[in-house]
Image (tube, grey):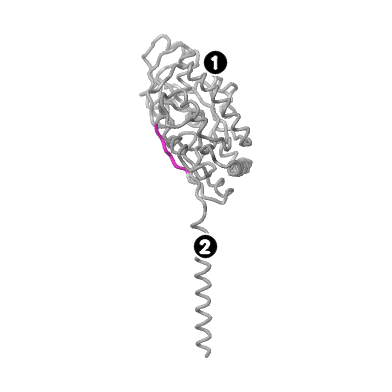
């Protein structure tokens, strides 16, 4: 009798354990997965920013937020993936200025950068830096302009790819200064910077994070930041405008976009989660180490910023004369 009772109790315990295990597995299987598409390769500012807060964003949304690099064609390959994804908040793109630039740069796109997306959360602002290979032997923006102007077509500049923000930043710089250089597109900001460090290319306008670690490197010289004011991360570095090219400025928002048609409630839910994560001092410190100023806005405010940036990038592309068929 005792043996039978123990057997029954043992079986009951096993059944209970199996039930709890099944519930746990089901909960795990049902956990939502959010795909954050980065339209550039590793080392690009969007990539480093995405990986600086994706885990915390996922936790805030009770989901798993996975970063996926879909590089190519100046960010348009990754953007196209998101434009065609289900409008349910499960697929986002961490975009930047190059997103709107593409509309004016490419003659054909499979999507509309403005109409096919909705702004979800502005997460930061990225500055850029004009840097040159030490072999150019220049020490200021004014020196750089003088040297390139005296040798039209002699020098090259690298970028993170055709249509990238690093491409347009330099193209508009050259147009405003009346200079000629050969564009050498690469697959990422890191690769573009490496080309300058190796001396194979003479200049680059890189995101701040791409060159901050080379301030004391003899192979490269940082000439100026490209924002309207000096970078808080490189305060001793003058702006391009104050050191040789008045009126020039270029920086970039960084934010999450979702496919157009994503329900407003879902957009606001993700926005609230992103803003909560960005309020964390630890996350803010991570962003600052990457040379990115954290930003928090409502989804509506971010959408207004995107529209204003659309108009501004149209002017930048037109001024640069850049075009990609």
In the image, 135 versus 228, the foreground residue is 228
Residue 52 is situated, as x and y percent measured from the top left of the image, at: 53, 41
What residue occupies the far front of the structure in this picture? 261
Question: Disc 2, disc 1: CB below 8 Å?
Answer: no
Residue that mark 1 sits on: 243
In the image, 93 versus 280, the foreground residue is 93
Q: Give the foreground label among 2 and 1.
A: 2
Residue 3 is situated, as x and y percent measured from the top left of the image, at: 50, 88
Q: Earlier in the sequence, mark 2 or mark 1?
A: 2
Residue that mark 2 sits on: 24
Question: In the picture, which quadrant includes the C terminus?
Answer: top left
Q: Is residue 281 visible?
A: no
Residue 271 is situated, as x and y percent measured from the top left of the image, at: 60, 41
Residue for point 38% across, 26% down: 185
Callout 2 crowding tier (Cα within 10 Å): few <14, some 14–19, many ≥20:
few
Callout 1 crowding tier (Cα within 10 Å): few <14, some 14–19, many ≥20:
some
Residue for point 50% across, 78% down: 11
The boundaries of the magenta stretch are 67-72
Above-or-below relation of 182 to 109: above
Q: Is residue 60 visible?
A: yes
Q: Secondary structure at mark 1?
A: helix
Residue for point 50% across, 74% down: 14
Q: Secondary structure at mark 2?
A: helix
Residue 161 is situated, as x and y percent measured from the top left of the image, at: 41, 28
Q: Is residue 70 magenta?
A: yes
Above-or-below relation of 172 to 124: above
């Amino acid at each position: 009798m005792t043996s039978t009772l123990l057997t029954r109790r043992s079986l009951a315990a096993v059944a209970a354990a199996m039930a709890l295990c099944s519930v746990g597995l089901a909960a795990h299987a049902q956990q939502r997965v959010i795909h954050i598409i980065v339209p550039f390769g590793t080392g690009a500012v969007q990539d480093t920013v995405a990986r600086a807060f994706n885990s915390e964003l996922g936790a805030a949304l009770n989901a798993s937020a996975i970063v996926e690099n879909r590089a190519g064609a100046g960010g348009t390959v990754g953007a196209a993936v998101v434009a065609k994804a289900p409008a349910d908040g499960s697929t986002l793109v961490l975009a930047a200025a190059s997103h709107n630039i593409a509309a004016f740069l490419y003659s054909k796109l499979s999507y509309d950068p403005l109409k096919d997306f909705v702004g979800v959360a502005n997460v930061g602002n990225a500055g850029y830096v004009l840097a040159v290979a030490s072999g150019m032997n220049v020490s200021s923006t004014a020196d750089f302009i003088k040297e390139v102007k005296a040798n039209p077509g002699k020098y090259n500049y690298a970028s993170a790819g055709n249509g990238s923000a690093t491409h347009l930043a330099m193209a508009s710089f050259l147009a405003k200064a009346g200079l000629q250089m050969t564009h050498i597109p690469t697959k990422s900001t890191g690769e573009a910077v490496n080309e300058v460090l190796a001396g194979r290319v003479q200049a680059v306008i890189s995101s701040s994070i791409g060159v901050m670690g080379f301030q004391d490197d003899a192979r490269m010289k940082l000439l100026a930041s490209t924002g309207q004011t000096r970078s808080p991360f490189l305060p001793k570095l003058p702006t391009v405008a104050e050191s040789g090219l008045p009126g020039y400025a270029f920086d970039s928002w960084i934010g999450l976009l979702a496919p157009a048609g994503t329900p407003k409630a879902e957009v606001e839910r993700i926005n609230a989660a992103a803003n909560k994560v960005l309020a964390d001092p630890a996350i803010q410190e991570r962003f600052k180490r990457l040379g990115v100023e954290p930003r928090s806005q409502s989804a509506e405010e971010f959408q207004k910023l995107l529209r204003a940036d659309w108009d501004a990038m149209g002017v930048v592309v037109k001024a640069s004369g850049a075009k990609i068929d």
